[in-house]
Image (tube, helix red, strand yellow):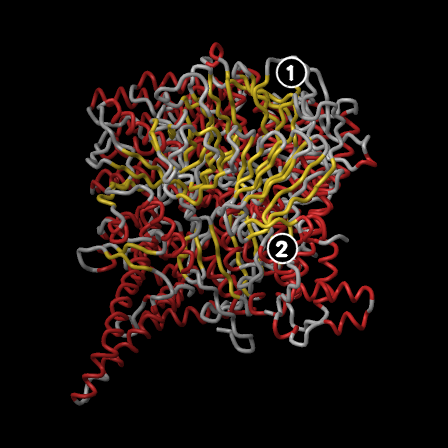
Amino acid sequence: MAQSGRRDAPELPDFSLLKRLARDQLIYLLEQLPGRKDLFIDADLMSPLDRIANVTTLKQHEVDKLYKVELKPIVSTADQLCFLIRPRIQTVKWISDVVNLDKAAGRLRRYKIIFTPQKFYACEAVLEEQGVFGDVTCDEWAFYLLPLDDDIISLELPEFFRENFLEGDQRWVGAAGGALRLIHSLYGPFSKVYGIGQCAKMVYESWREQVEDGEQKTQQPEIGNVFLIDRDVDFITPLCSQVVYEGLVDDIFRIKCGSVEFGPEVTSSDKSIKVMLNSQDKVFNEIRNEHFSNVFGFLSQKARNLQTAYDKRRGMDIQQMKAFVSEELKGLKQEHRLLSLHIGASECIMKKKTKQDFQELLKTEHSLLEGFEVRECVSFIEEHINRQISMIDSLRLLCLLSLTENGLLPKDYRSLKAQYLQSYGIEHLLTFSNLKQMGLLVEQQPGETLTVMESKVGKLVNDKTAGKLTDAFSSLAKKSNFRALSKRLVLIPKSGEEYDLRVPRDMAYIFSGAYVPLSCKLIEQVLERDGWTGLEEITRMLNGHEFAVSGGANGTESRIKADSQRIVLVMFLGGCTYSEISALRFLGRERGYKFIVVTTAITNSGRLLEALLDNHP
Amino acid sequence: MAFVTANWNPLGEAFYRKTELYEMGWNLKDGLRDCLLAAAPYGGPIGKHFWKKYTLCSTLPMSFFSPPFFSTTLYSKESHWKSGVVRQLGWTVCDDLLCIQEDGTVLIYDLFGSFKRHFSMGNEVGQSQVVEAKVFHSPYGTGVAIVTGASRFTLATNIDDLKLRRLPEVPGLQGAPTCWAVLTQDRQSKVLVANGGDLFILDYTACTAVNPPGLSPQASSIVHMCVSFSYKYLALFTDSGHVWMGSANLKEKLSEVETKVRNPPKQMAWCRRPKSRQPSVVIMWDRHLLVVGEGKDTISYHLEDDSILVPEMDGVRIINGTNHELLQEVPASCEEIFKIASMAPGALLLEAHKEYEVNVAYGINMLPQNYMDKSIGTAAHCLHPHHTEMSDRHQHISAASFGKCFLSNFPPELFVIMCRDLRVLNAVRDYTVGIPLTHTQFKQMTVQVLIDRLVYRKLYPLAIEICRYLKTPEYQGVSRVLKHWACCKVQQKEESDEVIARTISLKLGEAAGISYSEIATKAYECGRTELAIKLLEFEPRSGEQVPLLLKMKRSQLALSKAIESGDTDLVYTVVTYLKNEMNRGDFFMTLRNQPVALSLYRQFCKHQEQDTLKDLFNQDDDHQELGNFYVKASYKEKRLEARVAHLQSAVDEYNKAKNEFAAKTTEEEMRLLRFQKKLEEEKGESLVGFSLHDTLRTLLAVGLHKHAEQLYKDFKVPDKRFWWLKLTALAEKEDWEELEKFAKSKKSPIGYLPFVEVCVKHHNKYEAKKYVSRVTPEQKVKAHLAVGDMEGAADAAIERRNEGEISTILSRCSPTTDRALVERLNRAKSTAAKK
């Protein structure tokens, strides 16, 4: 890739420290309940916990049996129960039931709830209401950050997205601020913090407040700049089909906590295999950021290389053979295994995608992004709905249509919605209500062209400076203005030119050269300009809330250590996709940056939309 | 200056000295004869009470004035005593005065004589009356112990966390014991009681008889006892005139001295400093003071006046009507310097400095040649606080700084710190402040406590000055003083809220770590709610404002502040509080104006109180959300009727919300449900809950075409959808005949390419071919290719002269088998390209 002439990318900080910290704290908490105990773990904490402390570690600290929290009556016979949960009212209520059931049966046990990453007052209120507050002890496990890879850290809070952006519940803001504080105290001080979005601003403030409570340490900064971005600044990018290998694997097999389970159709045996997908996997590391069309070529090349390496055996004498077996063979075998897995996965992806008319789907997406042949797209979507091809994909296309066209025409809005309901049931009335609230799927205001709208928004922005934010404004502000944005930021490369996906020109390669992800483009622009100057028009269209703050007074000092200046931490509030990470990695290589992505969770179009469904009773 | 050693008296190996601290400024006619007097340790205040007259000049702490300033009455406050008979006075660690009354009530006054609060030492005290009481200090705070007329002891270890302990009975004790003392041992307060010759230790559970080892056999009764400041040592005075000294645990005897005085002493106190060379006790009779140590020797002083002894950690203060003195052992280091003809480096330095002041050259020459190498630390040594007690500090500082000049590599920190400490001690010793601290005491009690005590005396400027001078961190020092000042300020009733708030904010403006909420709390406690609110405005952390606002019932304001703080837990705290405090309507109205709180509460209701959620929407007339609520409720229901009923409510709400679309869809859903139910009953096919699409597919799959048709018409299913559905359903059943019929029934709204593709998908190329001819020209190539008919595809493409399509076919041809075709296509392509 285009690395020549660039400065060497700086070294990334060592994030394994975060894991060690979390583990030590967990062990400490477990030891607060001495003696043998059964441990109940929230289902979605299982995988993250596995990355921090394995079963042996837990057993060493007198954990007898491990159960998954299933919100059903328990069968444990232990005298001490420990619950490791997210602070959710539902789970706490279930624990109260467990305790009350024991009480009714005259059974004496000790209970301990460990909330992670923090407890909420509401949870304690439930305990109190259920009359078990005195029977349980509560603790907090400040496990904010799970490093998924060298450059990806996740808060593993998928509910952040729905709760913050749909329900308007800001309780996770503090947790995100806490996470930032942890990074700051270990790898800071930061020299500059940029951000866009209301939530980003709140997280920034929450972090500032938490820092002011403690002391400012003076150490060598390992992270220079920080960029906070709300997911609702850019919904388009996560709604597009991913075509970079890692993103595709996530779309199809769902990567969970950095590892994926390949089923029999991939492993070509009757077993499923769990594979960790990170930079340790040499094969994966080379293809993760590649456009899918290059992956097969790469894999076959790799297979040939492997064969050559194996072939070296021929004509070896005993001594050489011995060395080969002891030194190389193991590595080759390992590589062999991984290679066959990834080939299997690629085949599986191909099969699935051709079955669904993937090319047609991509064509429609690209047309939508370009705003080209929109009517054809509408009929494609209609057919997609009518044929009940995929509940999520149909919804995704509807949202993309609405976002790119600034809402659906009233006629289309009604008919597409009606057809969707016929296909998937009336409960999606609630889904549509949610999507509307998020501004993902809305009706065009009749008689208002884009320019009228723009001027109206502009006027309201001025009102805002006078301190008045009307309801009308917030509903209008949800309009995406995608066309105007894409023109100003040149998100859509000129069509007609041949785009060589093997040698990408820009970040658009992650969408087959059709679209530069808005989120990443914003980051690029802000870093280039060292702030938001010159982007006023754009931030106005994105509903503002942008900020850029210089860090401590020791600015000059940190300038000296230029390496850290080129390490940029990007925090996605509400999740980010693997494609965006790939795009940032590309940007880093191009500009001599290293990006660290911190996200509330890894997301993709499926997860994002599923979070907004309301059909689960 | 007189000889330093003039007031030194030898006793055993050590010297004792009595130095005057202050002349007393109180104008007493009768001396201290008719008063109760109490003084707090660490140079603390003095309290006085005329108990005979029953009128009180209650607290007269700290009036140690030099004669010229007689009239300055700083802290004294006289008032008429209206309460009962006071048995004992004492000071708490926070400089509050305790008045223990006969009936067991303990009244607490502050330094300025204003009443703070009271508590009782138990109801049973009422009849039997308090005979004697003692105030004591322990690591747990200030405690009170009393003995009643019924010979029972009651003890409270910490008056701020009052837990009364009634101690067990002492066997054979009638009336008051001869003497007693409070000990703190093994983290417990105990009482040591002497009844005649018997000695008992009382703890919470038991009364144990003890024997002091080696007590002289002549003694038949113990008439007085005292415990050292540290609770480590005990001294007993017997009727035979012996003083027994030993460890407080009664395991070790230190010495026993005969005083030759048989009448019981008025007071007795240990006079020891940490690292003392010998144990010594000061015993006081009416006009006679005796210091006894290890040996036979004693020091005897005559007292002019009635006095009291105040034990300190490093000496004894003696207070009488006119004087205030300190009696202590002369520390070794001090002795070294001032002993007659001492050759210690410190002594030489001091002497040299004295000469220096008279004659420069001589002074310097006087320094011994080996001064430098011999004693690097001499200057510091000279400065060592033990011998700079009180009087000669200035002289010593200048001597030390003189000596320092001759030392090149002497670390200055020690000197600087010592000078600073001494200056502070001098400042607080000033008669206007009146805290006569020794350096040992100062080090023991720390700067923080000293600052606190200045604050209690409302000496804010001095306290701030000292903080600044000692460079105490701001939040521990200046800010804390300012906070106390502000708390005091808010109590000034004569000034308006406005003025006070402004004054406070002006003064506190730039100080770090000030908690305005604490000051506001104080204001609120004084009944100045408005002022409290004004002060809270200055609090930068909105989280801090909330609890007080709630306490003041400013719940609306509390809610908005909580939201401002961004701490959802705090918001939730307020919400729960409001929920319990307000009636429902008001509560909902409040929430309505605070979207953040509202959404938080909604989240909670979603899991905990579904009905409340409904009420919330109702209150807001949010019909859209209500409709959604009912829809959600409907699919939690199992029974059809209940489901339909919920949906009907939803329809009503949607209509109110003017959401026709949702209303119509919901109505349709009701119809569909009824239809499904009916069919389910008739045909036994499970359908209820399926979407329209799924229902249709199921019907078609089981061959209920008629019903499917009916649904299709009733629900205005788009033609396209129906055709797709039927097509796939038939193909899945491989009912090719029916499919053909269906294809011919009328013109397909989805075209015929899907027919071809679906057939191919089900591996029936034969059937697929039937439909190829009906496909529109644009899709024909695709159709031909789908059934694998290259020739046909080629024909179609060439006919349409479409270059792209020709290329597509070419890419599918293999050059070996379809050579003729390839050629033909290539030709056609070139002609198409020409055009």
Q: Nearer the viewer, residue B469 or A492?
A: B469
Snapshot quadrant of residue B165: top left
Residue at 24% over, 49% down: A59
Label 1 element class? loop
Q: Is residue B656 above or below residue B746?
A: above
| Image-based side of A567 in relation to A258, left or right | right
Amino acid at pointer 2: Lys
Chain letter for mark 1: B
Chain letter for mark 2: A
* Residue denoted by label 1: B52
Visible residue check, residue A46: yes
- Position of the C terminus of chain A, as image quadrant, is top left
The x and y percentages for residue B220 are: 40, 28
Q: Are marks 2 and 1 on the same chain?
A: no
Q: CA distance from mark 2 to mark 1?
A: 98 Å
Label 2 element class? helix
Snapshot quadrant of residue B124: top left
* Residue denoted by label 2: A487
